[in-house]
Each structure stands twice: as structure tokens, then as C-alpha cells.
Image (cartoon, rainbow, N blue to C red):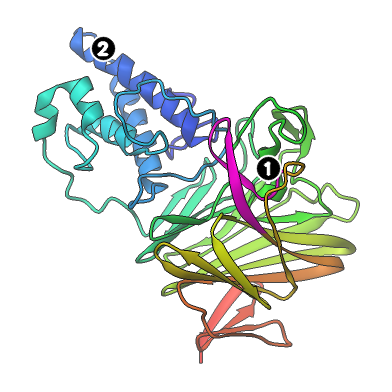
Amino acid sequence: IRKQVYPDGAYAQYSPNYQRVMLHDALWALRLGELNDDQFPPDIYQKVELSEQFLLQILDPKTGLVPNHGANDSTIVLPLNDADPNDFRPVIQSAHYLVRRERLFTEVDEDIFWLFGSEALESSLCSDDLHQKRFSAAVGGYYTLRGEDSWLMTRCAEYRARPHHADQLHVDFWWRGINIGCDAGTYLYNGAPPWRNGLATTAVHNTVTVDDQDQMTPYGRFLWLDWSRGQVHHHTDTYWEGSHDGYTRLKYPVSHRRGIMRLRDIWIVADELTSAGSHSYCLNWLVPHMSFQIDNDLITLQTHEGQFFIRCMPSKIVCKTADSASVQGWRSPYYGKKEPALSFSMTSHNEKRVVFWTILGPRPAASVLRGDGSLLVDGNQLNLGHDCLIECDVL
């Protein structure tokens, strides 16, 4: 636990699923220590608390789900409740109660009853705000931004341990409990092609691929060579920016920089890719299967919470649906199970520089892409800058 839990609470296996495995083992061992007057040292409890707080900050408050990030074989060491296996509130609640002897949630008490007894059900609720407007786990490479009814997590890591997925600058986007921009998950470690851990690739994540290549060099089912390095440039309550060097290994190296800005209920994602040579660039977004319509550059999604809109510029949007011969157009909420999803992409061929714009929101924000590369959104002019990729001027 001392080695595998980083100082920011992120986990060395880069996977919430395996982080829960570790926490379940820790809860079991630490609670047995307490009951037998052989308590573990305080720093182990501190690591458990750091881990619990990390998971809390990447938790969707409406559903209890976390991004389906990294390797996920759906393991649950302590199956002490009948909640959805992807609900992380029980393990977060148990770990928090172990350290603080207070609860975070009211509706997930089964685990603490079995581990701590009926007195745990009478404990007080934490009075602090559970989620920060922005959260940074720089060692693990996880960052969040939160709005009123939407939030996102993005990846930008300088790996200390073996990476599972090639997902630098991936964005997991949530709106009213719906994982609009989702991670494909895992599905199978061992399967007939293309399902031999095929959802670990860059192309199924919400980021940009270059020349149809992964951000790192695949070597077998579980290993990556040429580990990419992420760097964060800005992180405020409304803006995040980062880059990675995964494509600098190419003959003509490519720099990928991503900026993410929140304008009230609208989110803007800008991707800039530059190189001395020409490449093909493809921006990918994975969305749960639902009714949709594409009208030029605008995608309209029909969700159970109402319409949601995704606008992508400047190229044509292509939608790929589930095909058994391809890993695109699928997602796996549980290990061994896959379901159709919507894979939206936009490609720019034979370019030395390209800028992709993505606008997400519950309304089709008035937006115009100008000839100088700037973007006008709801009366705000977004310019491409040097120090900040997105510079915003209110008109």
C-alpha cells in the first residue's frame, strides 16, 4: 500500500477497478487488525484515505459511477452489497468510515454495517462539499473540472508504472449522470482478434490518433513500449490544458496539445496538432448508444434527460456503429460483456497542422468558425494563443 498508492491518492495500476481491489483488501486487513488489537500503522490509514479521496473526486455524484478507465476485469473482493458492481460509493463510504468514523452518503450503508456493525449506521454525515470544482492528481495523471450539472476527467500522465491503455488526453465527459463521452472499457484480455485486449488502443478513446497509430508502441497484450509523457500547462476552475509526446517518435514528430474550457453550461475542447511533415489526424468521440441525428457539423443526441448537442469542426463528422470485426463502435461496462456504442470521428488528411474544435452542451450554442482560426461561441471569441491554446475574449 505504501508503494502502490501515490501521494495524490492515484493508484499504480492506473485503474479504478484495481484500486477498489486494493481498498477491499486493505479494509479487510485493517478491520481485522482493529478487532484483534493489532492495528496497522497510521501511515497505512493515511494511504487509504488518500485513495478514497481520489476516487471521490472522479465519482459521478448522480450515479456513483467512475470513468471506466484502464484495465477492468470487474473484480470485487468484498461483495457485501447488492448495488450495481460499477457503483463505487460503497467502497468509498467504507474507506472513509474506517479512517474518519463518519459517512459520506446515506444510501449505501450495507458494507459499513457488515464491516463495523450497526453503530456505523448511526454515525454522522460529512458536512463538507464532496467534490472540488477542479481536482489535480498530478502524480497519477488525472484532472477534473466541474460545472453545475456536468463535469469531466482528463488524462495526462508521466507514467511511474506500467500503463494499461494508450489514452493520453482522453476526456471522460458526464452530464446529469450520463457518461456522454465515455471510455470503452476492457471487455476481454484474451479473445479472438480484434478482441485480444483491443479496447486498450488510442483509437477507441476520446482523443486524437495520428496516422492510425497508437500513442505508444504495442508489445503483446499488456505491454507498451515508448511510454508517452504528458505535461500539464494550465489548470484553473474553468480551463485545463495539456500535451503529450506520444507521437514524437514518428519520422516527422507530431505535437498534440489539448485545451478544455467551460463557458457556463457549454464546454469547448480544442486540439492542435503540428508537425514539420504531413500526417493524417483523426479526432474520436465515443458516446453510449442512443438515438441521434447529424446535421452538417452538429450531432443531436436524444437522452433520457433531454437533448444534448456535440458540434465538431472543421471537417465532416463520420459515425461508426458496432461491427464485430472492429473495436470501434463498442463499449464494455462489465468484463466479458460488450454493447454497441456510437463512435464519432473527424479526419484531416495530409496536413502539417490542424486544429479540431468540439463544443458540448445541453443546447446548440451559437458558434462560428472564422477564417483566422478563431471560434465565436455565444458572443465569446476564442482565439488560438501561444501561452494558452484557448484565449477567450468576451465581445
Residue 307 versus residue 282 in the image, above or below: below
Dots 2 and 1: beta carbons under 8 Å? no
Disc 1 marks which residue? 166
Q: Residue at x 75, y 44 (%)?
A: 326
Q: Is residue 4 visible?
A: yes
Left or right position of 282 against 128: right
Observer-nearest of 364 and 1: 364
Q: Residue at x 86, y 61 (%)?
A: 279
Disc 2 marks which residue? 32
Q: Residue at x 65, y 39 (%)?
A: 165
Furthest residue in direction bottom, as rendered: 395
**Element type at mark 1:** loop
Q: Position of residue 353 (x, y in %)?
A: 80, 69
**Label 1: how many Cα within 10 Å (few below 14, some 14–19, many 20+):** many
- Magenta stretch, residue numbers: 327-343
Q: Is residue 387 visible?
A: no
Observer-nearest of 143 and 85: 85
**Element type at mark 2:** helix
Image-quadrant location for residue 109: top left
Question: Is 329 within the magenta?
Answer: yes
Q: Main secondary structure of the magenta part?
A: strand
Left or right position of 184 against 179: right
